[in-house]
Amino acid sequence: MESRTSGFMVAGDLRWRVWNGVVADVWNVTCNERAEGHYVSPNPRLFVLLEMEGTEGRFEVSHAGGRAAHFETVSMCFVPARMALTAQAFNLHRIRHLDLHFSENAIRQRFGRSFDYSRLTQERLQFTDARMASIAGLIAKECITPQPFHRKYGESLIDALLALLFEVPPERTKRRTELSRRQLVQTTAFLEAHCFETIRLAELAAMIDLSQTHFSHAFKASTGMPPHRWQMHSRIRKVQEILVAREASLIEVSNIAGFSDQAHFTRVFKNIVGVTPAEWRRQNLS
């Protein structure tokens, strides 16, 4: 994200987490009497003002051609991708806020065709929602705690917050036939064991005596993703184990994992995890 600030100063270390393509930042910021910042992000983001301190102080956000929105705790602001935003603090000593950064692909992975993608272009400069405020507080706490819960806890909070933010309706699709438990265990175990190899759809379908089309639809109905995507997730999980267990270079890890080159490896890793392999390794070795 591009930013220019005057009068804002970060207090302490930035705390952040990544959950399935969504980056959550918690900022503690001290302010001069009239602090100001200008921000542009390539991705959509949600800004949540968690706390502010200052006698008769106020916090405002605005964008070119729009009126300023006055914030109260806990107020929120949804900013579409590439929309320039100005934030101003008047007579405030300190603010604490949560930022969620996410891509269209992160939304697609969660909600698929149930999502109205035009919502990503509709700014909401100031609004409040008690349910979202409660979830945002839990996400912020999970970012700063030294002993976080299982990743599924954070992912479920992110999913719930995004569903509320965009008012995502229930998915209305015809339920497809799923694989039996035996078939699912057999195929997913094979994908896990051979995740670094090239696996053909025909090979998986023949393993449980189904046509390729039937198998593909049944696998996705059972797991929520196509076989190839499942394999990529398995591959990246194994790669993460290598990144923290070995001192191998990223090129060596890319070759071990069967990617065509380091650029392909980085692209797939960031698409699934939300950050590059180098960034993830720094975060998990620090």
Image: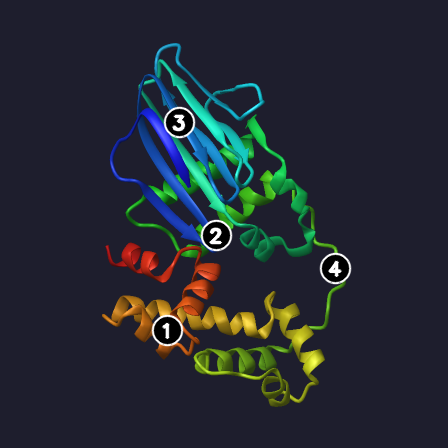
- Number of the label disc, if any, that sits on residue 155: 2
Q: Give whichever of 93, 128 is nearer the camera.
A: 93
Q: Position of residue 185 (x, y in %)?
A: 54, 79
Residue 277: where, in percent of width, then height? 36, 62
Q: Residue at point 39% right, 34% down?
A: 3
The image's mark for residue 254 is: 1
Whole-angstrom CA distance, mark 4 to mark 3, is 44 Å
- Horizontal and vertical percent position of residue 98: 42, 36
**As rendered, which of 159 and 41 lies closer to the eye?**
41
Relative to the observer, which residue lies in front, 72 or 62? 62
Quadrant for the N terminus in the image:
top left
Q: Identify the amino acid type marked 4.
A: Thr
Give the distance between the C-alpha atoms of the residues marked 4 and 1, in whole angstroms. Answer: 38 Å
State which mark lies toward you, 4 or 1: 1
Q: Using the rendered view, name the quadrant where residue 177 is placed.
A: bottom right
Q: Name the residue under label 3.
A: 37
Q: Which of marks 4 and 1 is nearer the N terminus?
A: 4
Q: Distance between the residues labelled 2 and 3?
A: 30 Å
The amino acid beneath tag 2 is Glu
For the point 23% across and 70% down, the residue is: 247
Give the class, few, some or many, for how many residues have Cα within 10 Å of label 3's Cα (few <14, many ≥20): some
